[in-house]
Amino acid sequence: MDNVELDYFEYATDGAAQAAYVTDGGTSDKSKSYTTNSTSQRLGDSGGLEYWNAMKFVFASEVTITQATAYFNANVGTPSGQVTCSLQTDNVGSPSGTLAHANATLTFTPTASSNNTINWSDFTIPAGTYWLVFTCAAQTTDNGWAQAIGTPGDAFLKTSTNGGSTWSVLNWDLYCSISATAQNLQCYSESTIKTQGSYSLKAVAAATDSLNDTLTHTFDPPKDLSGKTQIKYDVRASRTGSNFKLGWHDSGGNWIESTPNILEADEFQEVTVDISAVADADKDVIDTAKLTILNADAENVIYIDNVRYA
């Protein structure tokens, strides 16, 4: 039997994929904070050396960043100018000097003995390791700001005295935070892990919070499966078992549904759905496709490609 495209997921960008497969999943809080104030770390000049500070943050999933905070203790001397706060990518365990996003930088004048808020314009970054970096304009000798630090000391704080060329570990934590949220279920365009064409659809379902969330696509125009007996698709997931389902809505008001049993994690398998019992009067108008998360005991990364009918 000839195979005919139902959806090959040829969406060239994440934005195009997300416009085509719309999530109804909410967001969960992924904020991270370190709030002990035991002593201070210089930001600025000390003994003729210019100190920069950086704190490491690790996000296990894509997150949207809204703001950061940092507590400053009493100033040392009379610093002038402004402090720059930026979120940078990681380079072999230290700040790379490259912004995580074009919006991930802001200058401000710190308020002493206070928690200072850095209100970035919201931006989204992929899962990974990042550094919240604080720098300042050149200060005269022994003038600077005092950033609050404390224990338990996860060795997540580093300082540089040579403009970020090298970074040294401090066994303290910087008193700071990042406010972040994550979409519980979201899809993306995938150009590498696929079985046909240029792209597949990648869906990331968060642990716990993605349960019963859906990705929904409207066919425009609807698909006519009259006389067809099968729907086939290629699927891959990071979890084994039957943790999600795919469905196609017909003009009779019914859903043709398939719950694949993933036999081996991170390997594509072909699934065949028998639609021979669905009346032609119903399957002549297939108007919607939907992915639904059935089990969210752990995060699941799902790839779907090459949906066709025969």
Image (tube, helix red, strand yellow):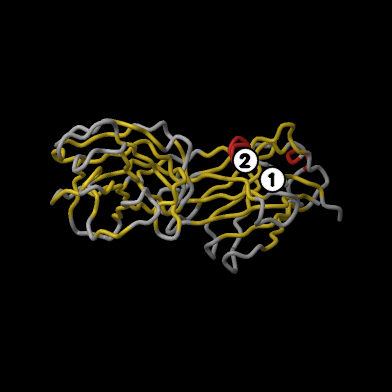
Q: Nearer the viewer, residue 310 or 69?
A: 69
Tag 1 or tag 2, which sits nearer the N-term? 1
Q: Nearer the viewer, residue 173 or 107?
A: 107
The image shows residue 280 at horizontal and vertical percentages of 78, 42
Using the image, tell me which numbered label, if any, was put on residue 9: 1
- Left or right, 296 with reference to 203: left
- Left or right, 1 with reference to 277: right
The image shows residue 105 at horizontal and vertical percentages of 40, 36
Q: Nearer the viewer, residue 42 or 207?
A: 42
Measured along the vertical axis of the image, is residue 100 above or below residue 114?
A: below
Are there few (<14), some (14-19), or many (20+) residues within 10 Å of tag 2?
many
Q: Nearer the viewer, residue 241 or 107?
A: 107
Q: In the rendered view of the protein, which quadrant contains the N terminus?
A: bottom right
Q: Amino acid at mark 2?
A: Ala
Q: Amino acid at mark 1?
A: Phe
Q: Quadrant of residue 263?
A: bottom right
* Secondary structure under the numbered disc 2 in the rendered image: helix
Circles 2 and 1: CB atoms closer than 8 Å: yes
Are there few (<14), some (14-19), or many (20+) residues within 10 Å of tag 1?
many
Using the image, tell me which numbered label, if any, was put on residue 17: 2
Number of marks: 2
Q: Residue furthest bottom?
A: 264
Q: CA distance from mark 2 to mark 1?
A: 8 Å
The image shows residue 285 at horizontal and vertical percentages of 74, 36
